[in-house]
Amino acid sequence: MSVGPLDLRLVPAAVAAWLAATVGTRLTARGAVAGLVLALGCGAVVAATVLPGRGRHRSARPPSAGPVVVALAAAAAVLLSCAVQLAARERGPVAAAAARGAVVIAVGTLTAHPVADRAPWAPEVYRVRTRMRLTAVTVGGTTTRTRADVLIVGDGAGLDHPPGTRLRVVGRLAAARGAQSAVLTATSATALRGPPPAQAAVARLRDGLRTATAGLPADARGLVPGSTVGDTSQVAPELADALRAAGLAHLVAVSGQHVAVVVMLALAATGAVRAPRWVRAGAAALAAVAFAVVVGGGAAVLRAVATGAVGAIGLGVGRRAVPLPALAAVVVVLVVVDPWATGTLGFRLSVAATAAIVLLAGPAARALGRTDRTRRWWLAVTVPLAAQSAVGPVLALVDPVVTPWAVPANLVAAPAVVPVTVLGLVTLLLGPVAPAPAGAVAAVAAIPATWIATVARVVATLPGARTPWHGGPGGAVALAALTGAAWCAGRALLAERGRRRR
C-alpha cells in the first residue's frame, strides 16, 4: 500500500492559531486589537511581496507563500475573536462584580453536565462544578441584562441539573482565568425551568444509563458510564488513581477513540443494507454529532467529533482520508470559536495524541509489517505507543511523573475497549424505554469493564508505575526530546532492517 507525502500546508495555520490564542487570551481587549493589527500588517506585507507578477515573473513566487499567508490569516482571526470576547467581558457587569467579590443573584442557563469532585477521605462529601451562561445579574438591588459564561461551584444537589436548565443562583463572584468570565460560588440554587425537549431527552438517556449500571460491582459501575459518555461521577478515587498510573485514564475521557467506535457502528449498519456511499457518510457524521450532544462536548470532544465528521464527508465524496489537514483545520476553527480551549488539558492531550497517531503510528506500522494484514496488527502496538509518546510531555507539565507501563497496559486492556463502549451505547439507548433489557446488557458490559479495572489496578502496583520526573516546561521539553530521540532511533533501525531485506 503506497502512501503519498504528508500534506503539511495547514499545519502552520494551526500552529499560528494556537500561538495567537495563547498570547491573545492573556491580553486585554486593546492588546488583542494591537496584535490583530500587527498580524494583518504582516499579512499585507507578505501578500504584497509574494503576489505573482504578470507573465514571466509569475514563476518567481516562493512556494511557501500560501501557507504563510493562511497562517497569518488564522492568527488574525483568533486575535479578532479574543478582542471581541475580551471586550464583552471587560465592560460587562459580571466583570465589575467579580473584581470586588460581590454577592449576586444570577439567572442563566446551564451549558454543561455537572461534575462532582469527591473528597478521597470521604466520598459522600463532594462539590459540584458546572458552567452557566448568565442572562441577568442582580448586584445591590440593581438587575442588569448580560451575557457571560461563568463557572459555578457549590455543595449539595442544588446544581445537579442537566444542561439547558434555567437556574437562579445566589452566591459570590470572583475573577477567573480561562474561558469563563468569573467563578460563582453558590450558596443556593433554584431551578426555574427544565431543559428544552432535546436536552431533556439527552438527560433521560444519561439517567437511564446510570440507573441500569447502579447494581453493578463498584468498578464496573464507574467504568461503563465513563467509557460510554465520559460520566466519571461513579468512578472511585482509588480506581481513578490506578487508571492514571497505568496510562488508561483516557478510557474514561471521551476521545477520538470513542468517536471512531460510534462512526464505525454507523458505517457498519448502513453498509449491511448496502446503502449508497453518501448515505453512509451522512449516517456516520450524524452519529458523531449525536454522540457529541449526548456527551456534552468540551473542546477535546468537539475536536474528536469534528475530525470524525471530516473523515465521514471525505468518505461520502469518495476522496482518500486526509487526517492531518483535517486535524489542522479543526484546530483552527475551534480555536477561533474558543481561544481559551488551548489552555485546557483535555484539548492539548487530544490534539497531541491525534497528531502523533497520524505522524508516527501509521508509518511505523507500515515499516514493521510486510502485508496489509500484519500492518493492521502492528497498529495495535504503534497507536498506543505514539499516543502515549505525545501525551507524556503534556502530562508532565501538570503531574511530573512518567508511566513506563502505559503501552503494555493499553495493549492488554485494548480487547475490552470496544466491547465496553458498544455495550454501553446499547445500554444508553435502551435505558429510558426498556430498563430490564438495559440492565442485562449493562451486566454483560461489566465483564470487559472489570477487565480494564483489573489491568489498571495490577499495573499501578508494578515497580516504577509512577516514576518521578522533572516538573515544569524544562521537564516537559526534556521528556519530549528523549521520546523524539527514541522514535528517531527506532526509525533508523527499521530503515537499516529494510536495507538488509533488499
Image (cartoon, rainbow, N blue to C red):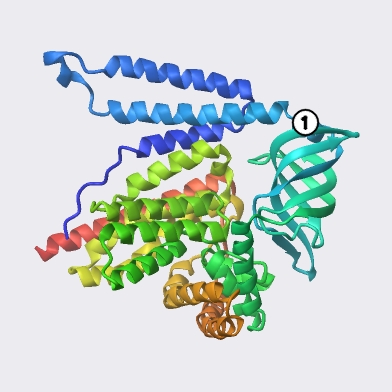
List x then y, in percent, for residue 109: 70, 48
Q: Residue furthest front?
A: 197
Residue 63 sits in quarter: top left
> Image check: 398 left or right of 146?
left
Q: Foreground: 43 or 166?
A: 166
Mark 1: which secondary structure?
Answer: helix
Q: Tell me the residue that label 1 is attached to.
A: 93
Viewer-proximal residue among 107 and 262: 107
- Can residue 490 be seen at all in this image of the molecule? no
Residue 396 versus residue 178 in the image, above or below: below
The C terminus, quarter of image: bottom left
Residue 218 horizontal/vertical position (percent): 66, 80
Q: Nearer the viewer, residue 267 or 3?
A: 267
The residue located at (31%, 56%) in the rendering is 489
Residue lying farthest to the right in this orientation:
141
Give the quadrant of residue 165: bottom right
Say which amino acid is labelled 1.
Pro
- Other-residue count near label 1 (Cα within 10 Å), few / some / many at <14 / 14–19 / ≥20: many
Q: Relative to residue 21, is residue 204 drawn left or right?
A: right
Residue for point 50% across, 18% down: 37
Residue 183 shows up from this direction:
yes
Query: What is the number of callouts on the image?
Result: 1
Instruction: Say left or right for 236 vs 9.
Output: right
Quadrant containing the N terminus is bottom left
Quarter assignment of residue 55: top left
Where does residue 268 sit, x and y in percent of width and height? 33, 70
Residue 331, image x, y percentages? 44, 43
| Residue at x 55%, y 19% (from the top left corner) | 34
At a point 11% along the width and 15% down the height, the residue shown is 56
**Image side of residue 270 versus residue 81, left or right:** left
Vertical placement of residue 328 versus 372, above or below: above
